[in-house]
Amino acid sequence: MNPTQTLTDALAELSIETPSWGYGDSGTRFAVFPQPGRPRDVHERLQDAAEVHRLTGSAPRVALHFPWDATDDYAALRAHAESLGLGIGAVNPNLFQDPRYKLGSVTHPDPAVRRAATDHLLECVEIATALGSTAQSLWLADGTNYAGQDDLMARRGRLLGCLHEVYTALPEEQELLVEYKPFEPAFYATDIPDWGSAVLICHELGPRARVLVDFGHHLHGTNVEQIVAQLAAVGRLGGFHFNNRKYADDDLIVGSTNPFELFLVFCELIGSGQPLPRLTIDQSHNVENKVEAMLLSVVNLQEAYAKALLVDREVLAHRQREGDVLGAHEVLLDAYASDVRPLCAAARTARGASANPLEEFRASGYTERRAAERQSGTTTVKGLS
């Protein structure tokens, strides 16, 4: 069997969504760091995404965020994406920047605020329909900072009431992805704090509600790959927001801090025997070149996936049955230690992409050309404005 051809076929199944917000200006809690050539609107963000797909061959869709990516003509936006060889990925509503949401959005004590939040979610359903998107990706900043600040059971009831309305409005081709986070910005009680809470919400909503796993949204020591296995087993794994963290939700480049965890997650995905779920990057590139960071992210995902494909499943299963603890562990270590970079480079080339995306990008002068074209105007899509 030709290993390059096998990997080429496998990479064809690896469809990664890059985030529009990962290409625009962003910052920390303290400052925004503008970069030369940063895109000024959603159309230019799509241009950068198209360059990432051209060089990697695995990033054919772009996740959008609203109102950050709002435009007057969604038919034209969809046509522009298609002209660049891209499709629109998940639509991400914004329920955390409006001043009205200080005490929550869909869980807010004030019915008028909840109505505004729900209306925005319904608007995003319409936007997704116009763009050909098949998913709403929902992360809530809702929560409380102090005991007694609000009634926790009442907040859950408000949340479900709003989401039931949104779920009922979803067309058949769209699913609702529910994300969780243990803390930040709420520091006493986050309204969807963990994967179990998210699963319970999905069960109450219906079969097209599934859980989205963000790598940064876990407490230290959490076994993310076990969560993935549990969700896949009950048919509620909706997809991922890929990033990495050292301390909390750092939004570092996926695979940069704990690449073994990333490899193990792909081992679980492959071992489940199910099609790969939605794979989306969610990162804030503040000190790195935006496109370079996205290229490295996609390459890291390709290599982690390739290593997971090398696991000898028959030998692994045999050693597991025999109770050979370290022998089974070594099967994974052998695959993880494999240098798959030449195979991935050959597989990208076979698909018409670049053997070395970062090297080719740096030599192309793309950043310099875009900087000359985009000399005026700026948009901040994550961080301070």
Image (tube, grey):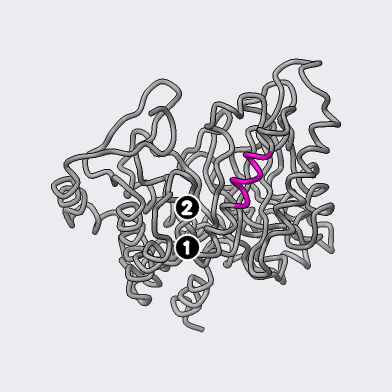
Q: Which residue is mark 2?
A: 64
What amino acid is labelled 2 in the image?
Answer: Leu
Tell me which secondary structure the magenta stretch mostly adopts: helix
Q: Where is residue 343 shown, x and y percent of the image?
A: 42, 68
Name the residue at 32% across, 49% down: 291
- Neighbourhood count class around disc 2 (C-alpha, 10 Å): few under 14, some 14–19, many 20 upward: many
Q: Vertical placement of 58 versus 368: above or below?
A: below
Q: Find disc 1 in the rendering and name its residue.
A: 88
Is 136 on the left-hand or right-hand side of 285? Answer: right
Between 269 and 158, the one nearer to me in the picture: 158
28 vs 331: above or below: above
On the image, the x and y values in percent for residue 243 come to: 52, 44
Relative to 78, residue 383 above or below:
above
Residue 127 shows which numbered tag?
A: none
Q: Secondary structure at mark 1?
A: strand
- The reply to whether discs 2 and 1 touch (Cβ–Cβ < 8 Å) is yes
Q: Amino acid at mark 1?
A: Ile
Which is nearer the eye, 254 or 148? 148
In the image, taking residue 314 as reference, residue 12 lies left or right, namely left
State the extent of the magenta-drawn residues as a range: 115-122
Of residues 143 and 305, the one nearer the viewer is: 143
